[in-house]
Image (tube, rainbow, N blue to C red):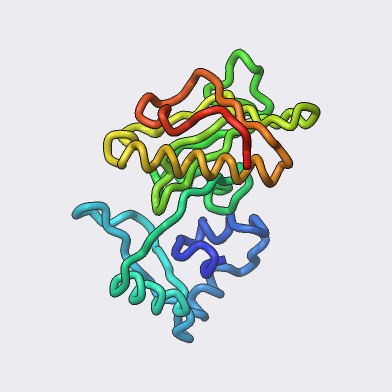
Amino acid sequence: SLQAQGLGTEKHIRNHFIRDRYPGLGDTLQDVMADGRIHPVQIHDNVQPWPGDWYIHADTLPLLDDIRQNPWSGQTILLSPFDNLIADRDRTETLFEFTYRSEIYTPKAKRKYGYYVLPILHGERLIGRIDPKIDRKSKTLHVHAVHAEPGATESLDSVATGAEIDAAIRDLGRFLGAEQLQYGPTLPPAWSSSLQDGPIL
């Protein structure tokens, strides 16, 4: 669990994958820390350390060194609502300041973002979300709305980011067997020039 998450607290481990099925976790953490398999870490936000006891797996430490020494280039992908990165909603809010709630069982008139909303991971940030639906008869992927997170359109290259989001959506369309992509009217103005209807090649 800790290897998959990169770092986390005891609560994050309990909520990961086999949720609440880590008997004796507190003692186990102390044992593997004594063995040098995990290490305690502090997470700082500007000056203030985050509360709680945080841990990192020993196998992750070389990865941190590599990131510090070599340029890192992320990608833009769409996440399932059940992806482990956002399955623990509280952890996602802590790490990314991104609030996600499933609205599948919310009455349509009360939904804020949509029925089956996919967050947009851009590099190391969650910058928005889309509300897609596939029409299998017409082989059309409808994206009813694209929402940007506060500050996302101001702090990023709008045209390039919009193009990467469009490419990720078209990848989703190809995976679903869609041949056409159709956007709805709700699009961030900064990205709208890159989010165009058309064939999925």
Q: Residue furthest left?
A: 47
Q: Which quadrant holds the C terminus? A: top right
Identify which residue is drawn at 56% across, 75% down.
28
Q: Residue furthest top?
A: 109
Identify which residue is drawn at 63% across, 46% down.
82
Between residues 15 and 169, which one lies in front from this camera angle?
169
Residue 137 point in image, percent of width and height: 80, 28
* Residue 64 left/right relative to 4: left
Name the image quarter holding residue 191: top left
Q: Which quadrant holds the N terminus? A: bottom right
Identify which residue is drawn at 21% across, 52% down.
46
Q: Residue furthest right?
A: 137
Examine the rendered structure and indicate whether residue 21 appears above or below residue 181.
below
Residue 188 point in image, percent of width and height: 41, 26
Examine the rendered structure and indicate whether residue 20 appears above or below residue 151.
below
Examine the rendered structure and indicate whether residue 30 appears above or below residue 143.
below
Between residues 69 and 190, which one lies in front from this camera angle?
190
Residue 73 point in image, percent of width and height: 38, 60
Name the image quarter holding residue 15: bottom right
* Residue 183 left/right relative to 61: right
Examine the rendered structure and indicate whether residue 11 appears above or below residue 96.
below
Residue 121 point in image, percent of width and height: 47, 47
Between residues 167 and 84, which one lies in front from this camera angle?
167
